[in-house]
Image (cartoon, helix red, strand yellow):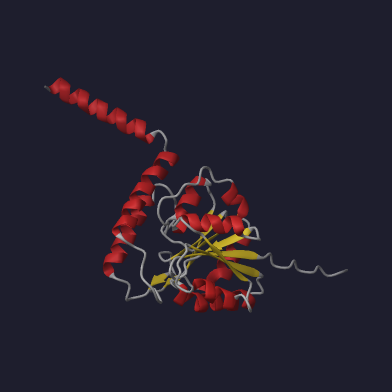
Amino acid sequence: MIPRVPDAPLPISIIVPTFREAPNLRPLVERIFAATAGAGLPAEVVVVDDDSRDGTEQVIAELARDHPVRLVVRHGVRGLAGAVLRGFAEARYDRFVVMDADLQHPPELIPALVARLDQGDADFVLGTRYAPGGEIQANWPQLRRWASRLATLLARPLVPLSDPMSGFFALGRATWERAAAVNPIGYKIGLELYVKARCTRPAEVPIPFATRAAGESKMTVSVNLAYLAHLVQLYHFRFPWLIWAMLFAMLAAAGLIWSAI
């Protein structure tokens, strides 16, 4: 009997959106390829930068001498979600991992996300802080913790995920391509893709969530307001009858008030 030769691992494209993250890129890329090489996982890194002009191009050029990493620079547009979608379009392979550049997501768990996707029973794999085994570093501000929990609760009717705010996830090209009218507002591209691709088989991998290594947080009041606008858009997509139900309820309430008067 001829022994079966194990199938070679399929390659992955790791999409990293950036804006003024140059100080984090060298340790991030080196940790990514240490993790994927250790798992025997062929990979490329696609950095999509929103014209940072902070030395990102020089850093990636140096890293590209030793690693399969390349840079796509977007001019005249800005936004994490759009950068991720551009990365999908530029990716050479059919399995994607998305992660932030600030070293809050652990590159060492990329193989775990991919392995879970490869089991074949999940169409969206999320790296989560809130599942058993996940954690947030103790020095993460308490206000940010509360805000994250509130944002999660607001999204819960849309997705059965413990951490829908997470930007660390894996999916296949086919899942992205079946997504309807992807038009995200703000930063929560994972939430957008899950809803618009009508994913029904999620899986989660617990992760330790670190504090930002260098640079400034992109979390501002305008970003939070954009998230609320994004939720309105997604609720309308997921529950198109909801706006009519609310209108009917308002008319019924007005009728009762008029009758009482």
Left/right placement of residue 73 relative to residue 79 reads right
- Measured along the vertical axis of the image, is residue 49 above or below residue 254? below
Q: Name the residue: 64% across, 76% down.
A: 37
Q: Name the residue: 34% across, 57% down.
A: 223
Image quadrant for the C terminus?
A: top left
| Closer-to-camera residue (235/253) | 235
Residue 55 in sight here:
yes
| Closer-to-camera residue (14/38) | 14
Left/right placement of residue 99 relative to residue 226 reads right
Residue 108 in sight here:
no
Image quadrant for the N terminus?
A: bottom right
| Closer-to-camera residue (177/91) | 91
Q: Name the residue: 40% across, 64% down.
A: 130
What percent of the width, then of the height, locates residue 167? 46, 61
What percent of the width, then of the height, locates residue 49? 50, 64
Left/right placement of residue 110 relative to residue 227 reads right
- Measured along the vertical axis of the image, is residue 144 above or below residue 235? below
What percent of the width, then of the height, locates residue 98? 52, 62
What percent of the width, then of the height, locates residue 173? 61, 54
